[in-house]
Image (cartoon, rainbow, N blue to C red):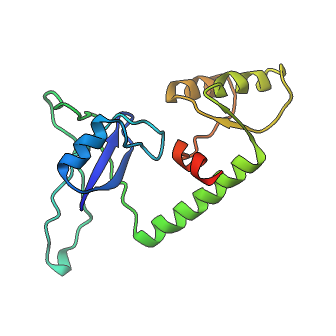
Amino acid sequence: MINFDVKCKYGHVFEAWFGSNAAFEAQREAHEIECPICGSNHVAKAIMAPNVGTKSNRKQPPTRQAPEGGEAEAGEFTEPVGLTSLPPKLQHELEHILNRVRKHVEKNCEYVGVDFPEEARKIHYGETPDRGIYGEATIEESEELLDEGIDVIALPMTRKSRLSDS
């Protein structure tokens, strides 16, 4: 198994395991790899610094480097990549908390899908009853809602988790 850092077209970086480089490419081309943050299936391998051992008294955190100049290769994105690794225990705790938030939202709010921006506006402007909703919106749509004074928050919910836990 090979562990790759994968980046979606919006710059979210996540780790994923593959049987081989060919398996990654096949899944990427079939759009089977989905960003756990935004659900995008337009992904590429993120540029990673090699994991080189250091003396125990000189340990430094790993870094990821963004591509410098030039054109991106096919399947690569040129946005800078930040350090996103968390210690395993903290990662597990965060995933547990986010899963509880997701379940609470799904239990107590109405799923409106891609109509989220339109429904949020209707509620904000009093055209429909005030209620909790969740759904899908692009980054641009979310920014427009915020500019209009409509409170929204992005939650890391994937389509797969909604389907598999219902």
The picture quadrant where one finds residue 18 is bottom left
**Residue 80 can be seen in this image:** no
Q: Quadrant of the N terminus?
A: bottom left
* Residue at 33 percent of width and 54 percent of height: 16
* Residue at 66 percent of width and 51 percent of height: 166
Residue 33 place in picture, x, y as percent: 37, 43
In this image, 54 relative to 161: left or right?
left
Can you name the residue that lies furthest to the bottom here?
Answer: 56
* Residue at 23 percent of width and 42 percent of height: 25
Residue 113 place in picture, x, y as percent: 63, 31
Residue 30 place in picture, x, y as percent: 32, 36
Residue 131 place in picture, x, y as percent: 81, 36
Q: Is residue 58 above or below residue 69?
A: below
* Residue at 50 percent of width and 30 percent of height: 139
Can you name the residue that lies furthest to the right here?
Answer: 129
In this image, 84 relative to 146: left or right?
left
Q: Is residue 98 above or below residue 29?
A: below
Q: Is residue 101 above or below residue 123?
A: below
**Residue 143 can be seen in this image:** yes
Front residue of this view, candidates 127 and 159: 159
Q: How many marks?
A: 0
The picture quadrant where one finds residue 42 is top left
Front residue of this view, candidates 145 and 138: 138
